[in-house]
Amino acid sequence: MKHKIILFLAAICLLFGCTKNETKKPVTMVFLPNESSDAMKDARQAFMEIISEAVGRPVEIKTTTDYNIALEAIISGNADMAYIGAEGYINAHKRNPAIVPVVTNSGPSGTLEDALYYSFIAVRTEDAAQYKDGAGYDLNRLKGKSVSFVSTSSTSGFVIPATLLVKKFGLNNTDELIQENSVFSKVLFAGSHQGSQVNLFRKDADAAAFAIPQTIGVYDLIKGEAYQTGAAYKVVEGAIEPFDKFPGSEITIIQSIPVLNAPIVMNTKTLSPEEQEKIQEALTSEKTANNPGIFKIKDSDKKGMYPKYTEKTKLVKTTDDWYDKIRNLTK
């Protein structure tokens, strides 16, 4: 009788499937340091739920404290998906062609046409007058100063601002720019956008390159137009770590540079074609466009990862060649 019961249960399992979702191999998604902070936990949870529902597998989220750790995870196959910057993607694709972009966040138009954010070169507001030149700022006055970048693989924290400075200073390449005592008295690589800002607050650097998320209340705009050259920001009271240690600290943007939005990428060798299609469809859906964990929706208590500029704003499909503008900067 006991054997009959066991055989009956086994037959039921074969017929209907008794494997729990948790026993299936999870899809792993890795995030850069900026998006690994506690302030982005709603976004990470939302991505986990959307992807899991799309492929019928659990999703494991990996957070990082360093750009290169995130990149190595997706390149090596230890992660199936990643949120990385444009330059990080280009490097990853070069080393592993199976890494391809899936989506990025649109601008107000709901298309790739205005899918941009901003890279900053900033100084402490108390020092900003040193760099003032008429109505603008003279980047040549950075020569001989100490400068902080994020990582050589960071688009907005190095590649874009460094390329601009190379052209401004008449140099041959970024290697020449970051050679200590060649242009700057000291060059720091913080490993994260937060770290580059901290280097500025602590006066470890006279100037810093970084980008700030447009959905997290770290700063109050106290002067100028948001995200543009000349804008001044002050760290708010009760800001998230590590900014909570620097309330009231002020920075001035002496150069703002538009940058192509970062992609969510996937490894096409570790995800099946069917899964790839399902994930892209789920991420570009209207449901995702109105998910308060993904986009900062007005009156929601969740902190979305992306700004919701208009009702048209959503995640849109992107391709490798869309990032040629960034790729060509480093040729």
Image: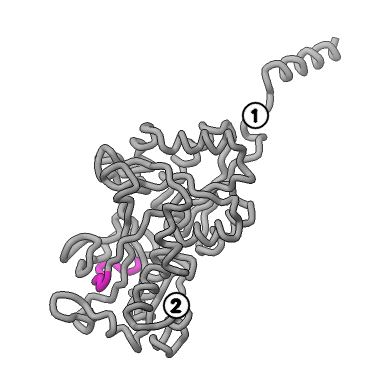
Task: Indicate whether residue 101 is drawn in magenta.
Answer: no
Q: Within the image, what quadrant is residue 238 found in?
A: bottom left
Q: Is residue 251 visible?
A: no
Q: Percent from the top left, x then y, of residue 305?
A: 37, 48
Residue situated furthest top in the rendering: 1
Looking at the image, residue 306 lies above or below residue 228:
above
Q: Is residue 52 visible?
A: yes
Q: Within the image, what quadrant is residue 328 found in?
A: bottom left
Separation (CA) of disc 1 from disc 2: 51 Å
In front here: 246 or 132? 132
Looking at the image, residue 27 lies above or below residue 326:
above
Image check: 62 left or right of 212?
A: right
The residue singled out by tag 1 in the image is 20
Q: Look at the numbered discs 1 and 2 and tell me whether their residues touch, using CB distance below 8 Å.
A: no
At label 1, the amino acid type is Lys
Give the residue at x 32% y 54%. Answer: 116
In front here: 248 or 152? 152
Mark with earlier residue (1, 2): 1
Q: Give the residues in magenta.
A: 244-255
Answer few, some or many: residues within 10 Å of disc 1's Cα (few below 14, many 20 plus, some between 14 and 19). few
Looking at the image, residue 192 lies above or below residue 127:
above
Q: Which quadrant of the figure contains the N terminus?
A: top right
Task: Indicate whether residue 250 is drawn in magenta.
Answer: yes
At label 2, the amino acid type is Thr
Looking at the image, residue 147 lies above or below residue 67:
below
Residue situated furthest left in the rendering: 134
Q: Percent from the top left, x then y, of residue 49?
A: 48, 36
In front here: 69 or 237? 69
The residue singled out by tag 2 in the image is 174
Answer few, some or many: residues within 10 Å of disc 2's Cα (few below 14, many 20 plus, some between 14 and 19). some
Q: Percent from the top left, x then y, of residue 57?
A: 59, 34
